[in-house]
Image: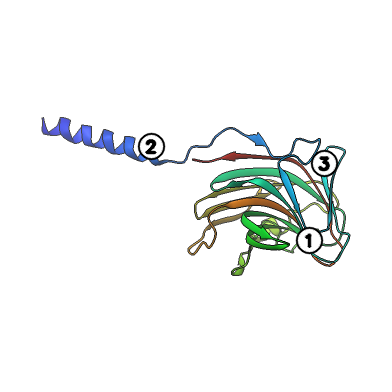
Amino acid sequence: MRLLGFTLSLFLLAGSIAAQEPKAGKWEALFNGKDLSGWKKYGDEKWAVQNGEILGEAVTKAYGYLGTEKTYKNFEFKGKFKAEGTGNSGIFYHSTIEGVNIRGVQVEVDPTPGKHTGGLYESGGRAWVVFPNAAAEKALKVGDWNEVHFSVVDNYIITYINGVKAVDFTDPKPKFSDGIIALQLHSGGEGKMRFKDLSIREIK
């Protein structure tokens, strides 16, 4: 009888742990390939759809952002980017924007290898949080399409660049926990970025 009770306790404990494990939903397109439905422009930089891609072009020397109308807390994101200018970019998450002032975390995107693409930078907070590893620093394909893939579950973040794991990080002091996703054009007037095949699945 005692053994049966012990076995039942283990079964109930295992069920409780399984019930608490994160569960991913279905993949959903963030960009429909036709227009910018579901997105909002911040700043005066140019955002347009061209050949089924989002094209961001700097027309001033200020920052510019294209943000989702919906907010996301825990999720997995994947997409492709291609730099045609010399200015860097990024994909922000857990973000809020007022004008062109953004607060949140950025998965860095830079047109030059060794400039920390795939690393995490916090705007409105700690600046660089974690750099990508050495292998990921070399994973960028200059002048070509690159794949970015990352997941955020509470304070645990993993990023990949072209299938190479760049960051596997548990943030001890997360400042932001929810917000929009936003594509960036850096200040300086040198940004020209393309994005496509953007999709997301929420994690409950």
**Residue 67 percent coordinates (x, y):** 70, 50
Q: At 16% from the left edge and 33% from the top edge, which residue is drawn? A: 5
The residue singled out by tag 1 in the image is 88
Q: At 22% from the left edge and 36% from the top edge, which residue is drawn? A: 9
Give the label, 3 or 1, closer to the camera. 3
**Residue 139 percent coordinates (x, y):** 73, 53
Q: Mark 1 is on which residue type?
A: Asn
Mark 2, Cα crowd under 10 Å, few <14 / some 14-19 / many 20+, is few
Mark nearer the N terminus (1 vs 2): 2
The residue singled out by tag 3 in the image is 53
Mark 2 lies on a secondary structure that is helix
The residue singled out by tag 2 in the image is 19
Left/right of residue 158 with respect to residue 190 in the rendered view:
left
The image quadrant of residue 97 is: bottom right
Mark nearer the N terminus (3 vs 1): 3
- Quadrant containing the N terminus is top left
Give above or below for 142 relative to 20.
below
Q: Mark 2 is on which residue type?
A: Ala
Mark 3 lies on a secondary structure that is strand
